[in-house]
C-alpha cells in the first residue's frame, strides 16, 4: 500500500521466518472472492504485547482480515507471520492464537468448567494442567463461582467472560477478538471494556480487536487501523488519528458528532469559503505551498462559546436549529453556509433552538483536506 500511513515494508531473510521481530506480520495480503477484491495488498505489523484495533464500518474488511490471521479464510496472495513463523498455510489450531467471537459459541449442555476445558481435553493435555489453566482463567475473569453453571443460567456478560476464558486457557501469545461486546447492552459494554483493558495490562499478550464502535477503539487501542474497502486508511495511536486524520474519511469517521466540514479554497496561506474566510498562519501544513479547492474541518468540541469567543482567531454568529442536552455536554446543531455545523458545549449551557449563538475557533485545531484526493494538506 502506498502513502505515509502504511506499515513498513518487511524483507524476508530466511524462508519461513520474518526478518523483523513482530508479534504478527502481514505482508502484501490479497483476498478475493471470484472477481470481488475484499483485501488489497494489505501490509500490517503488530508489535509484541500491542493492543491493536481494526476499526471500520460494515463491509470494510476488518473481520475478514481477522479471519485470515486466524486461518479461517484462505488468502489469495501474500504471507502471514505469527511470532516470526510463517503460518500462511497453517491450520488455525497450529497458529498459536486464541479467538473470541461475537456470538459466545458455548456448548449449552456443558458447564462453564466443561466449556473452558473442552479444547484442552481434545488436545489430550494432562488433567492437572487442565485444572490449573481453568482455575487461573476463572480467577483472572472472576468467574470462579460460575464454574458449575451451564450457559443458560448465565447473563450475557458472564457468557462473554466464559468465551474469553476459553481463549485464555490455551495460553497463547496472540488473542483475536471479533466484535465481542456488540451483543451486550451499553452499560455492560462499558464495564467489559474496562475489564478487557485490565486483562491486557495484566497478561501483556498481543491482542487484535475488531469493532465498528469508535469508542471501543479509542479507549482500548494502543494503535488503531481504520479500514475502508479492504484498505487501511490510517494506522496510528488514537490521539494521532483524532488530531491529525490523514484523509477526510478518517476525519469524518472518528468523533460523535463527526467533524464539521466547510468547502472552500486555499490561497496565499488563507482559507476562503462561502460563509467564512480566515488566515491559516498557525495551521501545521502537511503539504507546503498548497493552492486549490479544499475542505476545512473542525470538531464540535474545538469550537468555543461565551467569553472565550473574544480570544478566538475566528469569530462568527450562527443560528441554532436543534439543541440536544446530554447531561455532561450539550450539543447544538447550527447552520454555516447552508451546511450543518455541530457545537459541543458544557452541560449547563442555556442555549435554545432559535437563538443566535456567538462562536469561535482556532484554525490550528482544524484539518485541511485537498478537495480532489481528500488527503490531508
Image: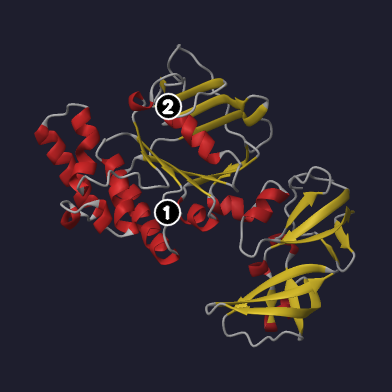
Q: Residues within 10 Å of mark 1 (few under 14, many from 20)?
A: many
* Residue that appears at 65% across and 29% down: 37
Give the colouring mode of the picture.
Answer: secondary structure
Q: Is residue 100 left or right of residue 374?
A: left
- Report how far apart the C-alphas of labels 2 and 1 lie in the structure: 31 Å
Q: Secondary structure at mark 1?
A: loop
Q: Position of residue 131 (x, y in %)?
A: 13, 40
Q: Residues within 10 Å of mark 2 (few under 14, many from 20)?
A: some
> Where 118 sits versus 111, above or below?
above
Give the number of the disc on residue 21: 2
Q: Position of residue 221 (x, y in %)?
A: 47, 49
Q: Position of residue 343 (x, y in %)?
A: 68, 73
Whether residue 142 can be seen here:
yes
For the residue pair 277 and 30, the one nearer the viewer reads as 30
Give the number of the disc on residue 181: 1
* Residue that appears at 48% across and 13% down: 13
Q: Position of residue 58 (x, y in %)?
A: 59, 47
* Residue that appears at 43% across and 47% down: 102
Examine the image and state in which quarter residue 92 appears: top left
Looking at the image, is mark 2 or mark 1 nearer the viewer? 1
- State which tag comes first along the sequence, 2 or 1: 2
> Where 150 sits versus 83, above or below?
below
> Where 120 sits versus 164, above or below?
above
* Residue that appears at 59% across and 30% down: 42
Amino acid at each position: 500500500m502506498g502513502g505515509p500511513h502504511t506499515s513498513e515494508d518487511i524483507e524476508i531473510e530466511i524462508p519461513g521466518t520474518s526478518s523483523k521481530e513482530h508479534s504478527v506480520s502481514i505482508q502484501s495480503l490479497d483476498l478475493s472472492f471470484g472477481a470481488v477484491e475484499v483485501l488489497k495488498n494489505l501490509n500490517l505489523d503488530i508489535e509484541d504485547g500491542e493492543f491493536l484495533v481494526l476499526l471500520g464500518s460494515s463491509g470494510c474488511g476488518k473481520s475478514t482480515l481477522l479471519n485470515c490471521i486466524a486461518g479461517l479464510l484462505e488468502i489469495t496472495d501474500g504471507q502471514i507471520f505469527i511470532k516470526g513463523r510463517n503460518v500462511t498455510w497453517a491450520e488455525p489450531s497450529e497458529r498459536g492464537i486464541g479467538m473470541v467471537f461475537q456470538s459466545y459459541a458455548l456448548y449449552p449442555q456443558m458447564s462453564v468448567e466443561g466449556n473452558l476445558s473442552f479444547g484442552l481435553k481434545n488436545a489430550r493435555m494432562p488433567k492437572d494442567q487442565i485444572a490449573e489453566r481453568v482455575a487461573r482463567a476463572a480467577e483472572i475473569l472472576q468467574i470462579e463461582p460460575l464454574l458449575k453453571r451451564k450457559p443458560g443460567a448465565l447473563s450475557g456478560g458472564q457468557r462473554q467472560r466464559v468465551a474469553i476464558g476459553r481463549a485464555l486457557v490455551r495460553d497463547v501469545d496472540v488473542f483475536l477478538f471479533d466484535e465481542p461486546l456488540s451483543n451486550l447492552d451499553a452499560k455492560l459494554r462499558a464495564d467489559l471494556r474496562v475489564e478487557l483493558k485490565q486483562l491486557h495490562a495484566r497478561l501483556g499478550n498481543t491482542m487484535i480487536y475488531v469493532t465498528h464502535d469508535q469508542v471501543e477503539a479509542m479507549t482500548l487501542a494502543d494503535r488503531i487501523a481504520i479500514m475502508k474497502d479492504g484498505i487501511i486508511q490510517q494506522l496510528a495511536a488514537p490521539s494521532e488519528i483524532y488530531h491529525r486524520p490523514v484523509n477526510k474519511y478518517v476525519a469524518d469517521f472518528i468523533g460523535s458528532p463527526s467533524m464539521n466540514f466547510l468547502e472552500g479554497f486555499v490561497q496565499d496561506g488563507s482559507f476562503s469559503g462561502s460563509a467564512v474566510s480566515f488566515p491559516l498562519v498557525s495551521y501545521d501544513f502537511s503539504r507546503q505551498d498548497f493552492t486549490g479547492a479544499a475542505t476545512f474541518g473542525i470538531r464540535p468540541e474545538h469550537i468555543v462559546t461565551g467569553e472565550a469567543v473574544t480570544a478566538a482567531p475566528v469569530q462568527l454568529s450562527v443560528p441554532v436549529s436543534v439543541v440536544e442536552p446530554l447531561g455532561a455536554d450539550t450539543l447544538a446543531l447550527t447552520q454555516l453556509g447552508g451546511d450543518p455545523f455541530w457545537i459541543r458545549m458544557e452541560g449547563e449551557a442555556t442555549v435554545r433552538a432559535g437563538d443566535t449563538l456567538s462562536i469561535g475557533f482556532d484554525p490550528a485545531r482544524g484539518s485541511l483536506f485537498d478537495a480532489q484526493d481528500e488527503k490531508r494538506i
